[in-house]
Image (tube, grey):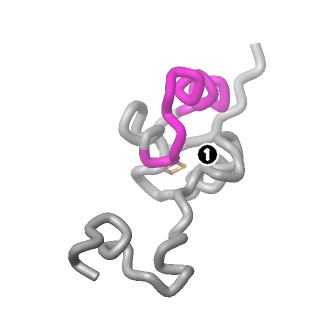
Amino acid sequence: MNRVFVCSCFGVTEEQVKSHADAGACTPRQIASVCKAGTDCGGCVRRIQALLGRDAFPRRQPADQGRSPLATEFPEAA
Ligand code: FES
């Protein structure tokens, strides 16, 4: 069996990351919460992100569009 390690700090393999993703983890933070990958040196976070796909990190659309995120969630605060 050929194991490809994604996170050498915690010995997490590519297969494990994919299995957590299949179980519903869709961000590097969620992967970290189930197996700690990415929580030590952080060197594997980009690889985890790549395994999860392009949209793994939530975009900051409200801020990017010049609107306050609070105004989006709480219209009365605008
Ligand atoms: S390689 Fe994953 S936290 Fe260091």
Is residue 16 a member of the stretch shown in magenta? yes
Residue 30 left/right relative to 44:
left
Residue 66 at x, y percent in the picture: 50, 86
Q: Main secondary structure of the magenta part?
A: helix
Residue 74 at x, y percent in the picture: 26, 68
Helix, strand or loop at label 1? It is helix
Residue under the image location 48 percent in, 74 percent down: 62
Q: Which span is picked out in magenta?
A: 12-29
- Name the quadrant containing residue 18: top right
Residue under the image location 59 percent in, 23 percent down: 22
Residue 6 left/right relative to 11:
right
Q: Is 18 located above or below residue 43 in the figure?
A: above
User: Which residue sits furthest right?
Assistant: 2
Q: Is 6 located above or below residue 43 in the figure?
A: above
Is residue 32 a member of the stretch shown in magenta? no
Q: Which residue is mark 1?
A: 48
